[in-house]
Amino acid sequence: MFLHHRTEVNQVGRPSFPRTLIDFQRRFSDEEECRRYLWESRWPDGYSCPRCNHDEAYELSSRSLLKCQVCGYQGSATAGTVLHGSKIPLNIWFCAAYLVTTHTPGFSALQLQR
Protein backbone atom coordinates (compact mmCIF):
# COMPACT_ATOMS: atom_id res chain seq x y z
CA MET A 1 0.00 0.00 0.00
CA PHE A 2 1.46 3.37 -1.00
CA LEU A 3 1.07 6.43 1.19
CA HIS A 4 -0.57 9.19 -0.83
CA HIS A 5 -2.89 10.50 1.84
CA ARG A 6 -3.41 14.25 1.66
CA THR A 7 -5.28 16.22 4.27
CA GLU A 8 -6.66 19.70 4.80
CA VAL A 9 -3.91 21.83 6.30
CA ASN A 10 -3.94 25.16 8.07
CA GLN A 11 -1.63 28.15 7.49
CA VAL A 12 1.47 26.56 9.03
CA GLY A 13 1.28 23.39 6.95
CA ARG A 14 -0.10 21.15 9.69
CA PRO A 15 -3.30 19.11 9.75
CA SER A 16 -6.16 20.80 11.53
CA PHE A 17 -6.33 20.23 15.28
CA PRO A 18 -9.53 19.72 17.32
CA ARG A 19 -10.71 22.77 19.24
CA THR A 20 -12.80 21.03 21.92
CA LEU A 21 -12.20 18.06 24.21
CA ILE A 22 -15.05 16.11 22.60
CA ASP A 23 -13.64 16.74 19.11
CA PHE A 24 -10.22 15.74 20.40
CA GLN A 25 -11.53 12.45 21.85
CA ARG A 26 -13.32 11.62 18.60
CA ARG A 27 -10.33 12.49 16.41
CA PHE A 28 -7.65 10.70 18.44
CA SER A 29 -9.60 7.73 19.74
CA ASP A 30 -7.00 5.12 18.81
CA GLU A 31 -3.34 4.57 18.04
CA GLU A 32 -3.80 4.61 14.26
CA GLU A 33 -5.47 8.06 14.23
CA CYS A 34 -2.63 9.50 16.32
CA ARG A 35 -0.01 7.93 14.06
CA ARG A 36 -1.76 9.31 10.98
CA TYR A 37 -1.74 12.80 12.53
CA LEU A 38 2.01 12.53 13.21
CA TRP A 39 2.70 11.45 9.61
CA GLU A 40 0.58 14.29 8.24
CA SER A 41 2.35 16.77 10.52
CA ARG A 42 5.76 15.50 9.50
CA TRP A 43 5.02 15.47 5.77
CA PRO A 44 2.11 17.87 5.11
CA ASP A 45 2.77 17.79 1.36
CA GLY A 46 3.02 14.00 1.20
CA TYR A 47 5.75 11.52 2.06
CA SER A 48 9.37 12.28 1.22
CA CYS A 49 12.09 9.81 2.21
CA PRO A 50 14.57 11.39 4.64
CA ARG A 51 17.43 9.51 2.97
CA CYS A 52 16.79 9.71 -0.82
CA ASN A 53 13.85 12.18 -1.05
CA HIS A 54 11.70 9.70 -3.03
CA ASP A 55 7.97 10.34 -2.64
CA GLU A 56 6.56 6.80 -2.41
CA ALA A 57 6.64 4.31 0.42
CA TYR A 58 4.64 1.34 1.55
CA GLU A 59 3.46 0.41 5.00
CA LEU A 60 4.97 -2.34 7.08
CA SER A 61 1.80 -2.62 9.12
CA SER A 62 3.13 -5.30 11.45
CA ARG A 63 5.70 -2.77 12.72
CA SER A 64 3.91 0.55 12.08
CA LEU A 65 6.65 1.71 9.72
CA LEU A 66 6.88 3.16 6.25
CA LYS A 67 9.50 1.74 3.91
CA CYS A 68 10.82 3.80 1.01
CA GLN A 69 10.09 2.14 -2.30
CA VAL A 70 13.51 3.10 -3.71
CA CYS A 71 16.18 2.93 -0.99
CA GLY A 72 14.37 0.78 1.58
CA TYR A 73 14.71 3.31 4.42
CA GLN A 74 12.28 2.47 7.23
CA GLY A 75 10.82 5.30 9.25
CA SER A 76 8.26 5.61 11.99
CA ALA A 77 5.92 8.43 12.89
CA THR A 78 7.77 8.96 16.16
CA ALA A 79 11.38 8.76 14.88
CA GLY A 80 13.36 11.74 16.09
CA THR A 81 10.71 12.80 18.62
CA VAL A 82 10.37 12.45 22.39
CA LEU A 83 7.82 9.70 21.68
CA HIS A 84 10.38 7.47 19.95
CA GLY A 85 10.73 4.11 21.68
CA SER A 86 7.96 4.79 24.18
CA LYS A 87 5.84 1.85 25.29
CA ILE A 88 2.96 4.19 26.19
CA PRO A 89 0.29 4.22 23.44
CA LEU A 90 0.17 7.34 21.28
CA ASN A 91 -3.44 8.12 22.20
CA ILE A 92 -2.37 8.34 25.88
CA TRP A 93 0.53 10.66 24.95
CA PHE A 94 -1.82 12.78 22.85
CA CYS A 95 -4.30 13.02 25.71
CA ALA A 96 -1.54 14.08 28.12
CA ALA A 97 -0.27 16.71 25.68
CA TYR A 98 -3.79 18.03 25.16
CA LEU A 99 -4.39 18.35 28.91
CA VAL A 100 -1.03 20.03 29.55
CA THR A 101 -1.45 22.55 26.73
CA THR A 102 -5.11 23.45 27.16
CA HIS A 103 -5.66 23.36 30.93
CA THR A 104 -5.56 26.78 32.56
CA PRO A 105 -3.62 27.84 34.65
CA GLY A 106 -1.52 24.73 34.05
CA PHE A 107 -1.33 21.03 34.67
CA SER A 108 1.04 19.51 37.20
CA ALA A 109 3.00 16.30 36.77
CA LEU A 110 1.04 14.87 39.72
CA GLN A 111 -2.27 15.61 38.02
CA LEU A 112 -0.96 14.02 34.85
CA GLN A 113 0.21 10.93 36.73
CA ARG A 114 -3.29 10.42 38.16
Image: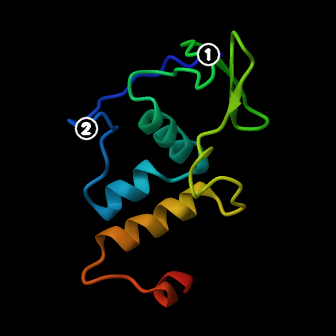
Percent coordinates x, y for residue 48 in the rendering? 52, 20
Quarter of the image holding residue 61?
Answer: top right
Q: Which mark is residue 25?
A: none
Report the residue at 70% width, 33% height from top: 65
Mark whose residue sits in front, 2 or 1 = 1
Return the residue found at the far right: 62
Q: Which mark is residue 12?
A: 2
Quadrant, the N terminus: top right
Drawn side of residue 6 relative to residue 36, left or right: left
Q: Is residue 33 above or below residue 109?
A: above
Q: Is residue 94 above or below residue 15?
A: below
Return the residue found at the far front: 51
Q: Which mark is residue 52?
A: 1
Drawn side of residue 42 relative to residue 14, left or right: right
Return the residue found at the far left: 11
**Pointer 1: residues within 10 angstroms few (<14), some, or many (20+)?**
few
User: Observer-nearest residue: 25 or 86?
Assistant: 86
Report the residue at 49% width, 42% height from top: 38
